[in-house]
Amino acid sequence: MREKDARVNADVPWAMAGPSGADATVRHYSHDAWNSISATIKLPSRGAVMGALAPILTPSESGERRSFLVAYPVVSQSKADRQSGNAEWAADLAEGMNEKLGRKTRAKQRDEAYKARGLDAKLARGNALTRPYAVCTVTVPKTLRITEFGRRLDASVRRAGFAPLRLDLAQDTGFAASTIPLGTSLTRSGDA
């Protein structure tokens, strides 16, 4: 336009320059000719069978790409000690209350108390406490409606027996963590 009209200012100051194709949506991440949506899954403490993840890993339509990351961030020693101490204290309190009331301690309560005391012993031996989670991402070309694929991803996570946790405002981090093998995760080093 500057070549045709001298009044057009073709010099944009760097302070005012910005991305030419940024999307303001919070539910997906746009990159090149692709859109991606990510969701996190809190993994159960007893673990999950690999076959249970099949609905999450299977694309629902041609052109769709899915990626999956399982992260095991280590909880800091002070937080792990505090969590272990609280669990052991709660187990002792429950046993004491049952004895005082004359109730029999149930097998599940005994197992939980044993697990709490075992965790304290493991931490004392130098083991670490982790809080595992998973990130699943679906990527489709920009020509397809990403919101529909986001709904399908959430439905497949529910079909697998998990609850999807949305990553609004952190879709770029979820995409990078689940697709780029750099050893990254969603946790910050100060939060560990």
Image: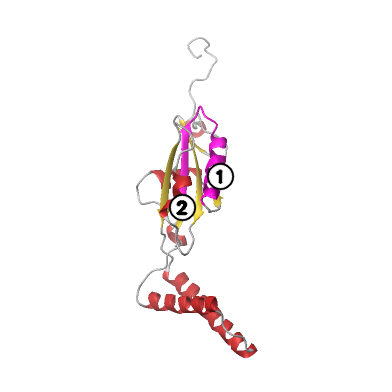
CA gap between label 1 and label 2 equals 14 Å
Magenta region includes residue 100: no
- Neighbor class of circle 1 (other Cα within 10 Å; few <14, some 14-19, many 20+) is some
Q: Residue 158: x percent and y percent?
A: 55, 49
Q: Residue 92: x percent and y percent?
A: 54, 83
- Please identify the quarter of the rendering in which residue 122 is found: bottom left
Residue 152 located left or right of residue 190: right
Closer to the camera in the image, 69 or 157: 157
Closer to the camera in the image, 191 or 109: 109
Location of the C terminus by quadrant is: bottom left
Residue at 48%, 58% in the rendered image: 43
Residue 187 in view of the camera: no
To which residue does mark 2 refer? 52
Element type where label 1 sits in the image: helix
Residue 68 located left or right of residue 100: left
Magenta region includes residue 140: yes
Closer to the camera in the image, 97 or 82: 97
Q: Residue 82: x percent and y percent?
A: 49, 74
Q: Amino acid at mark 2?
A: Ala
Closer to viewer: mark 1 or mark 2: 2
Residue segment shown in magenta: 134-160
Asked if residue 123 is positioned above or below residue 181 in the image, the reply reads: below
Q: Residue 155's mark?
A: 1
Q: Amino acid at mark 1?
A: Ala
Element type where label 2 sits in the image: helix
